[in-house]
Structure formats: structure tokens, C-alpha cells
Image (tube, coloured by chain):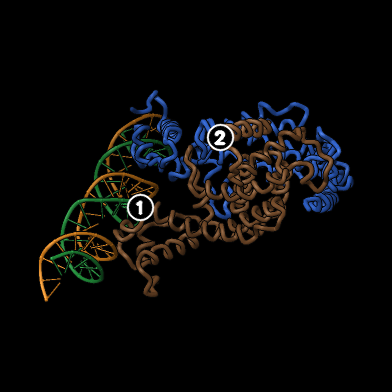
Chain colours: A blue, B brown, C green, D orange
Amino acid sequence: MSIDGQLPPKARLLRAAAELLANSGGSAVSTRQITQLAGVTAPTLYHHFGDKEGLFDAVVAAGFDEYVAGERDFAPSGQPLEDIRRMWDNHVQFGLKQPELYLVMFGNIRPESRPAIVADAEALMEEMLNKAAVSGQLNVPPKEAARSILAANVGMTLMLIAEKVPERNLELSAMTRDAMIFAVSTEQARDNGSVDSGKSSVVVAAIALNAALQASHSDQLSSSELKLFLEWLHRISNSSTS
Amino acid sequence: MSIDGQLPPKARLLRAAAELLANSGGSAVSTRQITQLAGVTAPTLYHHFGDKEGLFDAVVAAGFDEYVAGERDFAPSGQPLEDIRRMWDNHVQFGLKQPELYLVMFGNIRPESRPAIVADAEALMEEMLNKAAVSGQLNVPPKEAARSILAANVGMTLMLIAEKVPERNLELSAMTRDAMIFAVSTEQARDNGSVDSGKSSVVVAAIALNAALQASHSDQLSSSELKLFLEWLHRISNSSTS
DNA sequence: TAGCACCTATAGCAACGCTATATGAACTGC
DNA sequence: GCAGTTCATATAGCGTTGCTATAGGTGCTA
């Protein structure tokens, strides 16, 4: 009933915490449980991780690597918006496969305090959306698009986790996913065509140019010029989120 | 430093819990804090509410009444989908105005366990969507639509709560809201028209009829006939969430 | 061999949720 | 008017929680 295998105590603590978390069924996990399973006494935990939250952060960081690996594996299909769809589904699958870990990562909301991991996940999605923006497929600045899509993605995943397994309806996720992607994409990026979103082409072009410049680190302008130029573009881009 | 006013201990406990919750800033609130502020000893709490969660449930129930009151005040505009928009905004405003209470209500997710309050909020939205479905404005069964919209609504609200006040961007909420409503509505319900969702008119009609029958408790069919009929309609309706 | 980090254990603190038990107050039936 | 019952609150304390002051052991370098 303990984790051995000649591993150093730090690794044993991490493994014990992850294992207890995965099998906790949602109820709390105590430091005493963790240290006992790791075959270690209390102060060892605090020596290596500072406090309980530090340990959980470390577990989360490991979980995030796995999460990112899943996101990146699917990435380059050449169609950025298609990649966003896969990202969404991968996010949901990650949450349903490891609900307790997911809840620690994305379900621990506190007012005015964004966990680092959420910012990372958002950056990952923004990076992908940037490619869509460069090719003029985005109706909205990538940052805002990423934030909205991820919020809906997290909300949907949390709802699915809260539901009993046989009642989980992944079609709801698919519908919401497509609705969000549709909302942020330009008409030429859509299959069904013929929707006038009311956004002028200059705004779309500004969004695309903004994204392209940030991605390419162009040398054709001095850094101060570039800074001003980017700020100007940023203002135009943001005026699109009416 | 205590709540008096000749109120009975039960009411004082409720008020103390709500006040501490509102000012906790996200950190945990202990039963000892609550009972001390209420001017009462520990067993009194357990006599009236069973346990800590029971007390919080009672606080949440009171908060939910306030939430429902806000939702219902805005309700009957004659345009159900417009009412859904207001519902969404009201939900977000409620969350931003009382973030701690909101987090207890909607942020306490545990695997395979849906809090009663979520089901209530969903029923409230489903009720409203039913009106839209009756008039043929819904592309998707009301239950599924309510679940999806609410999931996105909660996700967006949680994201906004986690952001620092000056950085909260309500336009993201508006965009996501419109995207969700757009996704579940039929073409004739949309302002921009001319989008073919690929749903056949018979499916939309089935959804509308299904909603109308459930709302009216029609007497024109026997209960066994009605049951079979509803099941049949339900199957057609659900085939629309492709 | 001496000294020095590094790591782990012994023992225990304050705070937590909760409860077994007892006492007072209010109502009920005769 | 009084005993019996029920409701409501208090005293005191249990077991568990996250965390730490302190000390001892281990392996490396000088």
C-alpha cells in the first residue's frame, strides 16, 4: 500500500498525489494520505513543494504537459480553424478522461485570480488562431477569440463532467464548438457561405495584418515605428468586437 | 462585531454566512467564523442545517430566489429569443455582482454530481426556450439548447470572474451569447436571414410540435397514445442534433 | 577527518468540521 | 397547576486537517 520503486521521495510524492487525486472521486485529498502513500513524513512534502498547493501545482504542471502534448499532436493540418475544432475536442476528452485533474486545473476559480495554466491554455489557442487570422479567416482579434472559445470550452467540459457518464451528450459539445468557431470566423472561412457578418473588409484585413506582423517579427520597420503601428492596428482590430 | 437585531438564531446564521461569504474574497469560510458572527455556538448550526453544506445550500437557495427574480422580471417580451439574450446577460451580471455566492452556486463542480441549483437554472432557461420552440424558432430541442447555452453562459461568467475587474470584457460575453443563440435558432428567427442550417422543415416542425404538446397537456390523445407520440417526436427532434 | 549542504523524522501547534451530552425554555394534556 | 414532551442552545471535546520548530542523519568536498 505504498509507492516504492527506489524513486526519490519527491517523485514518490508527486506520483502519490496524482494517484490519490485520480481516485478521490471528487472528495478532498489530505496531505497525510499523500505522505503515507508516498512512504514519507509530513515535513518532506513541505521541504520539496512549500505547501499543499505547491504540490498540486506540480501535479497540474505534469498534467498540463500531457494536455499540451495532446493539443500539439493534432495541430498542423493546414486548416487552422479545423485545428481549433480538434483542440476543442481534445480539451473535452482530456477533461472527461481525468476529471479530478481537470477540476484542479480549470475548476478552481477564485475571483480576480487567473491560474497560470489557464493563461497557458489560452496562449496555446491564441497561437493557433493567429494562423487563422493571418490568412484572413478571423472576424475577431485572436486574443478575444481564444478567450471566448476557451471559456465556452471549459464551461461545456465542466458541465459534461458534472453529468453522469451515461447521460453525457458529446453532440452538445460539438454544436457549441461549431457555434463558437462560426462566430469568430469570416465568411470566406465558412462552409455555408453567404453570411454577412457586418464586418468591413478593412477590419478583417487589419486583424490579419496585425497577426501576421506579430508572427513574423518583421524588420522592415524600426522597433518604435513597429510599436506604434501595432498599437494602431490593435485599436482597429479591437473595434471589431462590437 | 456580531449580528443581532432580535432575529432568531437560524436567520442570524444565514445572514452571517452570506455576509462572510460575500467578503471572503474567495478564501474559505469556517463554521467557527460564522457562528461567532451570528452570536451562537457550534451545535446550533448543526441543529438547524445538519452540516456546513446544509447551511451553504440554504444561502444558495436564498441567492437563487434573487437570481430567479432577476430572470423573471425581464421575461415576457413576446420574443423568446430576445428574452434568452436578457437571461444570459442577467446571469453574467449576477455572477459579477456576487462572485463568491456565484462560485458556491455554479463553481463547485464535482464529477457525476449535478447540484440541484444547476438543474433549476437549466429548467428556467428550458422553459423560456420552449416558447421559442413552439413558434418554430428553434433548431434544436429545448432541453439540449438550454444545456448548451447554460454551459457556455457559466463558462463565460467563470472566466470573467477570474479576470481582474478592469480587464473584464463584456463584449466577449455578448459575442458568445449571440453565437449560441444563433446556433440553436432557425433561419426565420434570425435577423440576417439566408443561412441554410441544413435542417429540414419537418424536423423543425417536430421540435415545435413536441414543445407545444408538452406545454399544453393536450387532451386530444389518450395518455398511452400521447406517450408513444411524444417518444416518436422526441426521436425525430433529437436526430437534429447531428 | 572536519565541515557543510542537503534531506528526512520526531513531535506538536492551531484551526477545522462535527458531536455526545446536558440544560434551559416553551408548549401540551390532564 | 403540574408533569411530560419537545424544541433550542450551551459545555466540552473528539478526530482530522495543513503546517512547522527543531534535531538528526547522510553524503560530498576540503
Which residue does the numbered mark 2 point to in the structure image?
B227
Task: Indicate the position of residue A97 as horizontal and vertical percent values.
Answer: 53, 30
In space, the residues marked 2 and 1 are separated at their CA atoms by 42 Å
The answer to whether dots 2 and 1 both sit on one chain is: yes
Residue A69 appears in view: yes
- Residue B33 place in picture, x, y as percent: 38, 61
Horizontal side, residue B27 vs residue A43: left or right: right
Where is residue A5 drawn, in percent x and y?
Answer: 39, 23
Label 1 packing within 10 angstroms: few (<14), some (14-19), many (20+): some
Residue assigned mark 1: B51
Residue at x-position 54% and y-position 49%: A109
> In the visual, does A75 lie left or right of A199?
left
Q: From the image, which quarter does the N terminus of chain A lie in? A: top left
**Residue B147 visible within the image:** no
In the picture, residue B48 is in which quadrant?
Answer: bottom left
Residue ID at (73%, 36%)? A128
